[in-house]
Amino acid sequence: MQRWKGRDVISIRDFSKEDIEYVLNTAERLEKKLKERSSLEYAKGKILATLFFEPSTRTRLSFESAMHRLGGSVIGFVEASTSSVKKGESLRDTIKTVEQYSDVIVIRHPKEGAARLAAEVAEIPVINAGDGSNQHPTQTLLDLYTIKHEFGKIDGLKIALLGDLKYGRTVHSLSEALSQYDVELYLISPDLLRMPRHIVEELKEKGVKVYETSDLERVIGELDVLYVTRIQKERFPDEQEYLKVKGSYVIDLEILKKAKETLKIMHPLPRVDEIHPSVDPTKHAIYFRQVFSGIPVRMALLALTLGVIE
């Protein structure tokens, strides 16, 4: 599809429901092809540059794996201290340099808006792998892909977002994407970490049924999906504020006795102590399947933006 070639992936707000479904369907096609063979040749001769100014394990490795499985190759850095940024080079100059060596750029940066700036500067596609507490669109797409894989649909589900809803870029992106579907959304957090008001108001304006609470036990029996996030110490400007909410929620076997048998638990990872390891072998836990979903979804995004698949 020509409209995808050269397209930047910066915010989930830039995607219509049609766009989202197209990516999910493309990912499904590629996953089926992967089951037939371990690697493909769509991106042979193409180079992905991964620019990670902030730590990452799953996102970086899954992008690299996705590109290799498409038959392409990868260059980049895993922390700014290994790049010329340490010498004072601007982000603009870094992007203009790196695009001379590559065909697509994936960037993670601690500052909101950095990915958008990179896209404005670069003449090749730029994919946002997380910018501060703002957006993480590829995580959102793999989350949607995981839900659809488990339930065969997204419409009609009751989905809860739990934990750090104030600073969590994954839940900001996911809630905005879910506003395009017929879902009921439960926002569960300590008062200090409630979802930003402008996001809640936008959800309601789009007709989403939104329920806000700090009491997980009261609503867990209603839920189809429980999306758990860690409380991110690194996002807090004041450590004392972090200590007030640390350990607010722990998902364990005891609380799951109150859940539906069909409840699915997701987590963007890494986790700290918010999901007890005893939950891992249960039928509720799908967070490691969620990790795998990053491969076909990011393969789809790379292949589409490079224009090597329709």
Image (tube, rainbow, N blue to C red):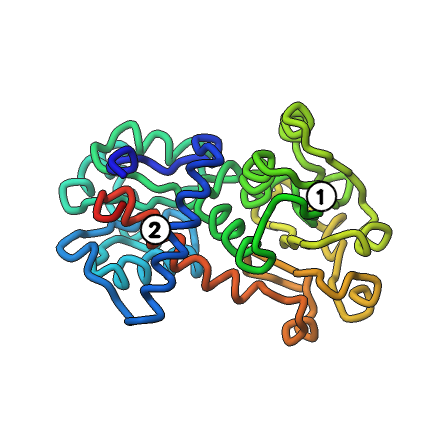
Q: Earlier in the sequence, mark 1 or mark 2?
A: 1
**Could you tell me residue 157's position as x and y percent?**
68, 47
Indicate whether 149 appears above or below 134: below
Indicate whether 209 appears above or below 292: above
Residue at which label 2 appears? 300
Name the residue located 62 percent from the left edge and 62 percent from the top edge: 272
Q: Is residue 223 left or right of residue 141?
A: right
In the picture, the disc for residue 8 is none
Quadrant where the C terminus is found in the figure: top left
**Could you tell me residue 156's position as x and y percent?**
67, 45
Q: Nearer the viewer, residue 273 or 30?
A: 30
Query: What is the quadrant of residue 226 in the picture?
Result: bottom right
Residue at which label 1 appears? 241
Q: Nearer the viewer, residue 201 or 205?
A: 205
Name the residue located 65 percent from the left edge and 51 percent from the top edge: 231
Numbered circles on residues, count: 2
Identify residue type, mark 2. Ala
